[in-house]
Amino acid sequence: MNEHDSERIAGLLEADGLVLADSDENADVVVFNTCCIRENADNKFYGHLGRFKNIKEERPDMEIIVSGCLAQKDREQIAQRAGHVDVVVGTHNVHRAVELLHESRRNGPITEIWDEALDDADTFPSALAVRREVDWSAWVTIQVGCDNTCAYCIVPAVRGREISRPFGELVSEVERLAADGVREITLLGQNVNSYGRDLTSARRALNPAHDDFEIAGEQWLADRRARPLFADLLIAVSKVDGIDRVRFTSPHPKDLREDTITAMGTNAAVCSHLHFPLQSGSDRVLALMHRGYTAQRYLEKVVAARAGIEDLAITTDIIVGYPGETEEDFVRTLEVAAEAEYDSAYTFIFSPREGTEAALMVDQFCDPAEVGDRFERLRVVVERSALAKHMARIGRTEQMIVEGPSKRDPEVFTGRTAQNKLVHFTSDRPLRSGTLATALITEASTHFLRGELVEVLSVSQHRTRFAVTAG
Ligand code: 5AD
Ligand code: SF4
């Protein structure tokens, strides 16, 4: 979400006539689009900001904007701690970033944080207005905010309540993106499976006849057809002409339903990758976290997803050292991680976020040395299954979208498979990024695959830049 917001701000700056600088030190306008999910993101930001204080002393005309979740959380504190910041803008008024910059030129430094978005147009700007990192792939925000109450998580406080973008609007946006040369989309939301829940309740509020739709039966089915839900959305966008790949992030295990698994398993364009955040394998800790599922229930869904979706890759997020986590709890996490056989996992050390329930459990915080040790033990378990999954791919021919030449070796290209695996492969010809191709996998490691080009399936048709030179 944060990356996508960065693209939005870059789009606003481009529309204002600016171009991307070759380095941040050389820029006239520098934007810090911040994250506050864990404490080290906070610390890193204040460190970077300090570095720019010196740069700005030498180049006083440099302008600094701070946006994002940390701005929403810290509000006036940012301007108080860093007098060299020109604009502080929150998560609900990202679209105001450049207007505020103009205002600060007239009236001096400005902090503007809203408590909620005023209307859908502000919340969901068109993905076409953003400056995309790559031409052939686009993020599409389907929902902002989160109505869950995970005890460790700051997101609901900084992103607000869950709001879904209307179904029809999303489908036409994807159609326009496809016409613009985009072949891969990633649907974005904090809890994508609950997409549409608020649209439905809004409709219920308008029409009391819908009140009993949860009672299974014909009426429920009729309403169900009328009501946009995540599986329907997956199916609709995967059918858009020109869209070869649909990804999404992230689903919440408690809300993953059979219809989503079926939609993934039966629509070729929907990628065989499920990011499925476990957080902990201990039922006791899961309950403390208010996650709404048990390890058993989670693993049942893993089995159902693997049964319903061919060649599915499953990845996860796990928190180590949640307040009160005992050795016994942690061993359950190891066991569940081993049983789930993840393709990869993001593992995090618990970080207390002020204002969350877990941050108050100070007397139960775990010993940092013990947590470090657990973190290492978890890494070993996750890497074992990741390597095994990758080794099993050796000798197979995998379809990928080419992302470009490798940063280290221009003879080598990188591509990404539907399972979200990175492939470093050799090619006897130049390849445009966005090209669909296949590679024979020859080697595997924990984090990537190696291979060689077999066939180019479809060249990226996207053309945007041209040059006319005299000579
Ligand atoms: N401490 C550690 N990890 C956290 N996450 C969210 N909040 C915290 C926190 N306070 C992790 C979760 C989530 C991912 C995006 O970040 O695992 O899924
Ligand atoms: Fe945070 Fe939980 Fe919402 Fe994810 S589902 S954003 S972890 S509160």
Image: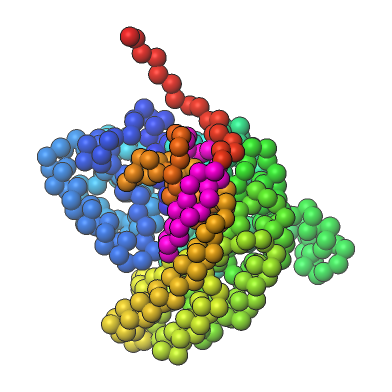
Q: Relative to residue 85, is residue 202 depicted above or below?
A: below
Q: Relative to residue 248, is residue 240 depicted above or below?
A: above
- Chief secondary structure of the magenta span? strand
Q: Is residue 448 magenta?
A: yes
Q: Which of 322 and 398 is in front in this view?
A: 398
> Which portion, as a residue range, is magenta?
431-454
Q: Nearer the viewer, residue 239 or 118?
A: 239
**Is 329 left or right of 295, judged from the image as shown?**
left
Q: Which residue is drawn at 41% across and 89% down?
A: 327
Query: Is residue 376 among the parts visible in the rendering?
Result: yes
Q: Relative to residue 381, is residue 436 depicted above or below?
A: above
Q: Which residue is drawn at 27% across and 35% down?
A: 22
Q: Which residue is drawn at 42% across and 62% down?
A: 445
Q: Which of 194 and 316 is in front in this view?
A: 316
* Numbered circles on residues, count: 0
Residue 372 x/y as whole percent? 31, 78
Residue 191 x/y as whole percent? 56, 62
Residue 464 x/y as whole percent? 48, 26
Q: Is residue 255 magenta?
A: no
Q: Which residue is drawn at 52% across and 59% down?
A: 394
**Is 21 left or right of 388, judged from the image as shown?**
left
The scheme the figure's colours follow is rainbow
Q: Which residue lies furthest to the right in this view?
A: 218
Residue 351 x/y as whole percent? 35, 72
Q: Residue furthest top?
A: 471
Please state, as top left, top right, bottom left or bottom right, where the C terminus lies in the image: top left
Quadrant of the rendered structure where residue 458 is? top right
Query: Is residue 120 among the parts visible in the rendering?
Result: no
**Is 178 left or right of 387, judged from the image as shown?**
right
